[in-house]
Amino acid sequence: SLTLGIVGLPNVGKSTLFNALTRNDVLAANYPFATIEPNVGVVELPDSRLDRLSEIFGSERILPATVSFVDIAGIVKGASEGEGMGNQFLANIREADAICQVVRVFADDDVVHVDGRVDPRADIEVIETELILADMQTLEKALPRLEKDARKNKDLAALVDAAKNAQEILDSGRTLFSEKDSFDLSSVRELHLLTAKPFLYVFNADESVLTDEGRKDELRVAVAPADAVFLDAKVESELLELDDEDAMELLESIGQHEAGLHQLARAGFHTLGLQTYLTAGPKESRAWTIRQGDTAPKAAGVIHTDFEKGFIKAEIVSFDDLDAAGSMNDAKAAGKVRMEGKDYVMADGDVVEFRFNV
Ligand code: GDP
């Protein structure tokens, strides 16, 4: 499954956040046969629609979708020069599908900042710079060979052009992802560039920032088009010790209405380009993970490869229509249940039953 790699400078709260992610681990409970890697934290994607579906269908259990985060050892300035952990760090990032940077915004004189001051933008730049330098090296190595091959194989001309465009962006100090609206990231996919991966920022903040909408907007704008999540990592780890009511009280005491881990799960899911569809029955109500833009047979394949191969039709009702109707029969009577074929592109909130040949 797709993963987000957690990176950040030392002492920004990565371990604190990661511990909260792993202690919240849902794999062990819901998927007893899954292998659990020590450096992977899996969080549930909160979805209240599943509660409603299990009510309608009398489901025995609920299985939400999950998002996986991988803990990547701390970056040091100079990683792109291959110093110390540098090479390993970059290799680990290369394996992740998206980059999730934890950025310190909390003030605490007892926690030393590596550069002696709390400056989120400067911290973001340190990491970006290492990734940009690594991509520039990759392109410097790849381009001469690509240009040579392109003389024999005309199909490679487009890739050479894309690589040169990428070089220009990187030379100007920007990541490729930050230019995603004007630069087609898929045009350089086979070069596996680090800054072409989607980015997500987690601002580890205290109450003063969490309740300051203006300050949060400033930071959001600074990292756009990447998503931004604001949470207090220390509070998140404390929440897991509490029952729901006490947890809500603690969150509200710092001006929050929802656990930061929930927000992080949603943002992570979005950053990875994923979406869910739903199935429901007496056994379980469940969310299944697909890529945005997937067709019905692709979606069926997530349940079982045979469902994709033998796909005939998908019987689909949107969650809102089913919710309003109150039962599948009433939704059918109201003409809200559709039959969709193999070209249908799945929409968020589709409640589905697949028809297939075995
Ligand atoms: P890492 O080096 O990025 O993994 O950072 P750690 O998670 O080890 O955190 C470094 C220190 O900062 C620890 O003493 C944490 O208790 C503290 N810390 C982490 N998150 C917060 C936070 O949100 N607020 C405050 N005040 N301290 C935090």
Image: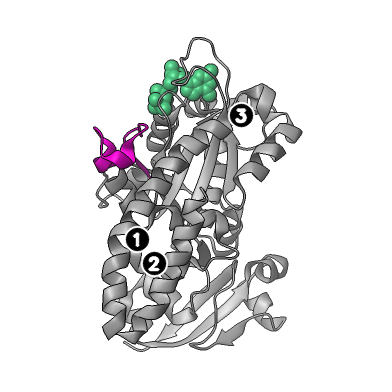
Q: Which residue in the protein does label 3 denote?
A: 245
Separation of residues labelled 1 and 2 (CA atoms): 6 Å
Q: Which residue in the protein does label 2 denote?
A: 189
SS for callout 2? helix
Residue drawn at (43%, 34%), measured in percent from left and top? Answer: 8
Separation of residues labelled 3 and 2 (CA atoms): 46 Å
Q: Which mark is residue 192?
A: 1
Q: At which x and y percent is residue 86? A: 28, 38
* Three-letter amino acid code at the position of disc 2: Arg
Residue 71 magenta: yes
Question: Which residues make up the magenta segment?
Answer: 69-89
Q: Are marks 1 and 2 in contact (CB under 8 Å)?
A: yes
17 versus 349 height, above or below: above
Q: At which x and y percent is residue 101? A: 47, 40
Image quadrant where one finds the N terminus: bottom left
200 versus 310 height, above or below: above
- Residue in the foreground of this view, choosing between 82 and 220: 82
Left or right: residue 3 versus residue 230 is left
